[in-house]
Each structure stands twice: as C-alpha cells, then as structure tokens.
Image: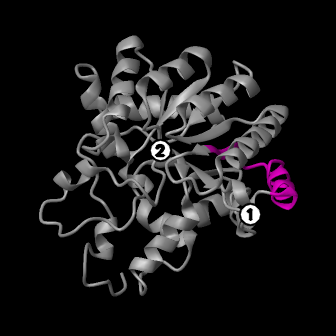
Amino acid sequence: MGKNNKKGPSEESLLLPAHPAHTSAPIVDTHTHLVSTFAAYKHKYKEGKYENVYDFVRGIYRGKRISTLVDVWCEAPVQPVWREIADSALVEEDKKEKWGGLEYWFVMASHEARLYNDDVEKDILEAMTHPRNVGWGEIGLDFHYDNSPRDIQRDIFTRQLRHAVRLGKPITVHTREADEDTEQILKAEVPKNHRIHIHCFTDSPDFAQRLLDHFPNLYIGITGVITFSSNENTTEIVRRMITNSPTPRIILETDAPYMVPANIYSSLPGMKGRFPLCHTAMIPWTAEFVASIGGEGWDVERVLELGKTNAHSVYGV
C-alpha cells in the first residue's frame, strides 16, 4: 500500500483480521455511505493504494464474507455519480470485476431539509426507477443538530414519506432527539404494514418499543454506536427485543464512515491510535456486542444470520 499519514493507524490496519467468532455467516450492511467512506480514506491516506470506490471495496472487503451493501445517498443536490455506481452493479461481469462479487443496492432521499426543492425531488424520483434502488432514505428529524429549522424538517419529512408510501418503497428513517414528532408523523403518514428501517437508533427505548408495537414491519438499525459507553439506550432496546422474541427485529449497519465499534480494538493488540473511518468489515464486532446482550444461545454467527434475514424482510436484498 501507499505511504501513510505518520499519525494514527497505518493504511494496512484497515485490512482487518478475521473476527475469531465469524466463521461462515454472510455480512449484510444495510446502511453505508460508500462515496463518503472512500473520501474519508483518501483524506487520511492521500497516497493510498486504492484509486476509486471499486478498488477500495475489492481491496478492503476481500475475504471478509461480505455479501451485500445498501448504499445511502441523502445529499441535496443529488450527487450525479450515483448513476455511474448503480449502473456498475447491473451486469454480472461488472459485479465480479468491479465489486468482487458482492451485491450493491442503494436507497436515496434528501436528509438536508432546507435544501430540498422540486429539482432535488425530481432527481430522487428518477433514482427510484433504477433496478438497484431498494428504498427511500434516509429521511427524518434531527433536533440535536437542527441543521434545518424544525418546521421545515417536519414538512420535508412528511413530503418524502408520502412519495415513499405512494411508490411502495421501504423507508429509512433518521431520528434524533425528536421522539414525539417522529412518532406522530410516522403514525399519521405511513400504513401500519409498511417496511421501515429506523437507522442507527440511539433514542429512548420506550419510543422504539412504541414504534415496534405499532408497525409490525419496522426494524431497528444497529451500528457500532451500541458499543459506546456513552450510549445505554441502544443496548436497552436490544435487550428488550431479544427478551421478547427469538427473532428480534434488528438489522445491522455501519453508517460508514462513522461509528467504528469501540470493542474492535481488543482484537488489535499493539495498534496505535484510532481508526479514521468505519467500514463494512467491522460489522462482526457490532454483532459480537449484540450477542453479549443476548447471552446464552447467542453468538456472532446467529446475529449475522439474523441481520441477513431481516435485511431481506426490509429491503428484499
């Protein structure tokens, strides 16, 4: 590999060792930002080996039992490169040569409510017709950062939900510190049986339980944030779900390039610093933490298999 930044982990460290408990189950990442992840890689390793997204995927994910990626496009305006990447997953030869055999799918929306307009909406609606599209998202309310005025957030969330429902598209929801408003809007706009993915859940367990009780096809997305000592909410809702059902409605995701699982470093003795980015091959460490919550009868393989089954239920992948 190319020269690396002298500070922090080397580029080679991104080529993770196999998780000791991951022996056969496929990895399905239901929420990753590939272009942003590659950009984070190039920012940190300016002379790095990988020249494009495809090189990065083939190089970093080779031999890691990664079967499926759901890529997320949620910028406004829509990035035109989405089509090139989606088209590259249409033909079997390209899947093998560019993607190393893994399955690429995508969802699209605009999470930037203040920038949403008719032109953005037109581009998203066009993307919904692409054969590799499997959903509308991520959309929702973020009252933590408040990057857009809250009334605009509510209006654009509602507007996009109505399109997704009309088209029958699974919905990827971002919600943070907006429990009451998110719950009210979802229950008002979305049919009970619609497929919903609450992405990277960190809010009140009671809020999550109300959504699970109301929407039988709603699933809770689990990222590496579950391993953070500052986050007890995600652990608690997973504990409740595992207690209540042998097949809890959880799906696994990275939200890459964010949310590196904190427990990964115990598998990397001698490593200096912290990873500058997360990627899909880190999911087994998230699965390990989920299995530890489940206790007896739960292990990494069972969690990964559950993630695969539930990803198919939500997105059909």
In the structure shown, which secondary structural element does the residue marked by tag 1 occupy?
Answer: loop
Is residue 134 something one can see in this rendering?
Answer: no
Q: Residue at x 22, y 19 (%)?
A: 296
Q: Which residue is mark 1?
A: 78
Badge 2: how crowded within 10 Å, few (<14), some, or many (20+)?
A: many
User: Viewed as shown, does residue 220 lie left or right of 231?
Assistant: right
Q: Residues within 10 Å of mark 1 (few under 14, many from 20)?
A: many
Q: Between residues 109 and 289, which one lies in front from this camera angle?
A: 109
Q: Residue at x 27, y 48 (%)?
A: 19
Q: Tag 1: residue type?
A: Val
Residue 197 drawn at (x, y percent): 58, 34
Here the colouring is one colour
Amino acid type of disc 2?
Glu
Q: Is residue 271 left or right of residue 161?
A: left
| Number of marks in the rendered image | 2
For the point 40% across and 12% down, which residue is it?
244
Per the image, the residue denoted by label 2 is 253
Image coordinates of residue 87 in percent, x first then y, are: 75, 61
Q: Which residues are magenta?
A: 117-140
